[in-house]
Image (cartoon, rainbow, N blue to C red):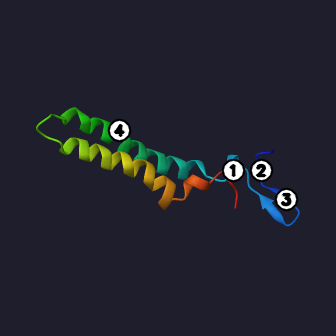
């Protein structure tokens, strides 16, 4: 399949190569990676007496995957509409 939008009858088929702009992808990737790395960093403060770093880790980890898949609608971006 080509990397350009093609006509197929009345419907246009948008390929994964051209549906997201580079700037938009970078602006989404950077904060989500920061959330993910922050969740890993929070584990450095984990002790048996202090469970809060694990709660922070789970919360940040959840947000790093949930935001792109639900709020920004990236989970179905390659599936077509």
Task: Specify few, some or many for label 3: CA neighbours under 10 Å numbering under 14, 14-19, or 20 or more.
Answer: few
Residue 81 position within the rendered picture, expressed as x and y whole percent measured from the top left: 70, 62
Q: Residue at x 66, y 51 (%)?
A: 78
**Mark 3: secondary structure:** strand
Query: What distance separates the C-alpha of mark 1 from that of mark 3?
Result: 14 Å
Residue 4's disc number: 2
**In the rendered structure, which disc, 1 or 2, sits on the residue that comes first in sequence?**
2
Q: Give the side of residue 29 with respect to residue 15, left or right.
A: left
Query: What distance separates the C-alpha of mark 1 from that of mark 2?
Result: 6 Å
Q: Which residue is mark 4?
A: 37
- Residue 14 quadrant: bottom right
**Mark 4: secondary structure:** helix
* For the residues bearing labels 1 and 2, Cβ distance under 8 angstroms: yes
Residue 38 position within the rendered picture, expressed as x and y whole percent measured from the top left: 31, 41
Residue 18's disc number: 1
Task: Specify few, some or many for label 2: CA neighbours under 10 Å numbering under 14, 14-19, or 20 or more.
Answer: few
């Amino acid at each position: 399949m080509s990397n350009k939008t093609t006509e197929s009858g009345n419907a246009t088929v948008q390929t994964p190569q051209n549906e997201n702009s580079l700037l938009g992808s970078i602006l989404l990737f950077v904060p989500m990676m920061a959330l993910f790395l922050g969740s890993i960093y929070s584990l450095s403060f984990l002790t048996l007496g202090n469970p809060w770093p694990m709660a922070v880790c789970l919360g940040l980890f959840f947000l790093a995957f949930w935001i792109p898949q639900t709020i920004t609608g990236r989970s179905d971006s390659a599936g077509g509409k």
